[in-house]
Amino acid sequence: MPTSRFLAAAALVTLALTAQAADTEVSLVIRDHRFEPEEITVPAGQKIKLVVHNQDATPEEFESHELNREKVIPAGAKATIFVGPLSPGSYPFFGEFNPKTARGKIIAK
């Protein structure tokens, strides 16, 4: 039969793993072929759950060479993109279909 010390240690391990599994969620909107906000600051060393809502009537592709991510987001749809954990720095992204206007960056601090 497990001792109370063993059960307490198991509970602490479970709690620590649950806390690590919680991702930082960040919302990003595509409107008028632009990302809003254009700049996102996130904690370094954490996995990020980026939820992108394309409010335009046309599709857009979220792309970032630095983050090694690309995802087409249909008109009116939402997409989830996981990135990180990120080292401190700046990570630019852009819309492949509107690269002159749809630009932004994630800053990890």
Image (cartoon, rainbow, N blue to C red):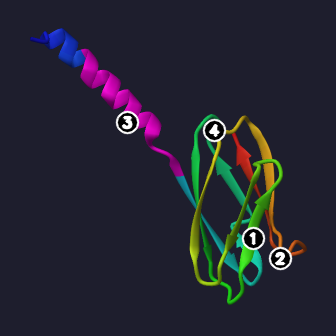
Q: Which residues are magenta?
A: 9-24
**N-term-proximal mark, 2 vs 1:** 1
**N-term-proximal mark, 1 vs 4:** 1
Identify the element where label 1 is drawn.
strand
Magenta stretch prevailing secondary structure: helix
Q: Which quarter of the picture shows residue 19?
A: top left
Crowding at mark 4 (Cα within 10 Å: few <14, some 14-19, many 20+) = some
Which quadrant: the N terminus? top left
Query: What label sits on residue 61 in the rendered view?
Result: 1
**Callout 3–callout 4 Cβ contact below 8 Å:** no
Q: CA distance from mark 3 to mark 4?
A: 16 Å
Dot 4 amino acid type: Pro
Crowding at mark 1 (Cα within 10 Å: few <14, some 14-19, many 20+) = some
**Callout 4–callout 2 Cβ contact below 8 Å:** no
Residue denoted by label 2: 97
Name the one closer to the observer, 15 or 43.
15
Tell me where residue 43 appears, x and y as whole percent: 62, 41
Crowding at mark 3 (Cα within 10 Å: few <14, some 14-19, many 20+) = few
Residue denoted by label 4: 85
Q: CA distance from mark 1 to mark 4?
A: 22 Å
